[in-house]
Image (cartoon, coloured by chain):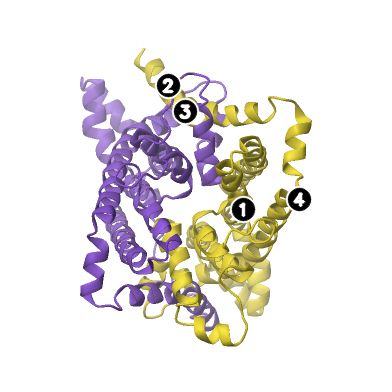
Amino acid sequence: MAEPVAAAGAPARSRGVRGSPTLGIGVATGYLSLIVLLPLAALIWQSGKGGSHSFWPAISSPEAVSAIELTLVASVVVAAVNAVAGTAIAWVLVRDRFPGKGIVNAVIDLPFALPTVVAGLTLLALYGSQSPIGINIAFTRTAIVLALLFVTLPFVVRTVQPVLKELDREMEDAAASLGAHKLSIFRRIIFPNLLPAILSGVALAFARAVGEFGSVVLISGNLPFKTQVASVFVFSQIESDDIRGAAAVSVLLLVISFVILLMIGAVRRWATRHDV
Amino acid sequence: MSRYGLRFAALAYLAMLLLVPLGMVFWRTFEHGFWPAFHAVTAPDARSALWLTVLIALIVVPLNTIFGVVCALAIVRGRFPGKGIVNAVVDLPLALSPVVVGLALLLLYGRLGWLGPWLGSHGIKIIYALPGMVLATIFVSLPFVVREVVPVLREIGTEQEQAAATLGASRFQIFRRVTLPAIRWGVAYGVVLTTARALGEFGAVSVVSGHIAGKTETMTQYVQAQYEGFNTSGAYAASVVLALLAVITLLAMTLFRRKEET
């Protein structure tokens, strides 16, 4: 009953009774084109308007390079912490039992529900200059990582949790009866089953971290070359009317997002093939 | 023993990252009693920011709900060229920086944008006005209903709809009496996520709003403006209003997820 196959995505269905809902397809693609594709096309076109002569200088200015570097390094750190902490939290929520677990489970979604700027302010209240516990990390790179950890918390937990729930306990019991150590059961049975979920959760968290703005803007101080991340760099370029610089870095962020989405799609296909 | 260690570590991480900081904001807000906080959130600029935020959500959520259901039906039931692209584009707002979204709108509708000159000569204002803020919010909150409804539609299949069709039901009747009741909790969950995102959107709206206090300032921008203007108590009080909305969102999410599972 608890076969992992059950979670392997939808079975192929016969064609809908109504054939293809033509009107719906038209509405869906039209709305998407108008809201999403048209503005992005304008962005890409504007960034390439001056040709490569203006695109490369804009994206390779020292300030831009330093912002992009900081963003990527911070996002890798955040993704790695999430891989461990997210899996551990999912494990505790599925396999452990303690009073108040339902509340903890609901709290996981708090970063999705709370506006990002409030998340940043919240962290400042505890870890800022008026910190009641004497930890002041405002305007440092540590603060950026902390803010990114806050907003990316749910991704790994919410992708790993359902897979862990569906996981067949009999395999673990069999391994234990054959004398396998707890750690080797985790490493050789549980972890391989969770890996696709962990990877797609980590990829989502990474994508979110790369583009994050609201939670970082108050706590980072936005000092160029020190604590200015890519999205804040783009914002400050817009404010100082350097649209070309803003557009060039934006196109890079757009490409990163798209590549990550393609990778997540690939991981999902790979995972379902394993199951079937 | 290791079980307790892991439980403690996980709960401590959640507490130090989420709950204690959030508690601090509440404590700082009501440090001097209820009334100072109440006066801070009923100041004219705060009231106008709250109303603007609600207005944007009232426009965006119904539009994205209708689109979400239609788009989910197209993705699950439709067969058309470019379906893979539609599927990928729907997810894009989840992975894209909100500032990039704002800039893209600026470069389409703004002074230097593709449509800017035409809009300007016709006296239509999109950037630094409500339409731009609405477009930005639609963009960033677009995927939620689609992503919640697609798996439910896959799950229910088409047998019941086929049965209804053989009994002579019209397409609209099938949708209203068979499909819609089956997907309603998925839709509700998506609506909650869309609303939370619409109320809390910051980056994309910041780029296109122009930040005019009392006019084009949403609740989240009001928080930032107050904090940067050294009125931290005003920022905290407005944050508490947004945090309370988030708590309501969490309650709704928990409720709807339970309904969806049964």
Q: Residues within 10 Å of mark 1 (few under 14, many from 20)?
A: many
Q: Colour of chain A?
A: purple
Q: Which mark is residue B199?
A: 1
- Which percent across, then down, holds residue B103? 44, 66
- The chain under label 4 reads B
Report, in whole angstroms, how far the alpha carbon at label 4 lies from the one at label 2: 46 Å
Determine whether label 1 and label 4 are within 8 Å by CB.
no
Determine whether label 2 and label 1 are within 8 Å by CB.
no
Residue linked to disc 4: B44
Residue linked to disc 3: A127
Q: Name the N-terminal-most of marks 2 and 1.
A: 2
Residue linked to disc 2: B7
Report, in whole angstroms, how far the alpha carbon at label 2 lies from the one at label 1: 33 Å
Q: Which mark is residue A122?
A: none
Q: Colour of chain B?
A: yellow
User: Which amino acid type is shown beneath numbered disc 3?
Assistant: Tyr
- Which percent across, then down, holds residue B101? 45, 64
- The chain under label 2 reads B
Q: Is residue B12 left or right of residue B221?
A: left
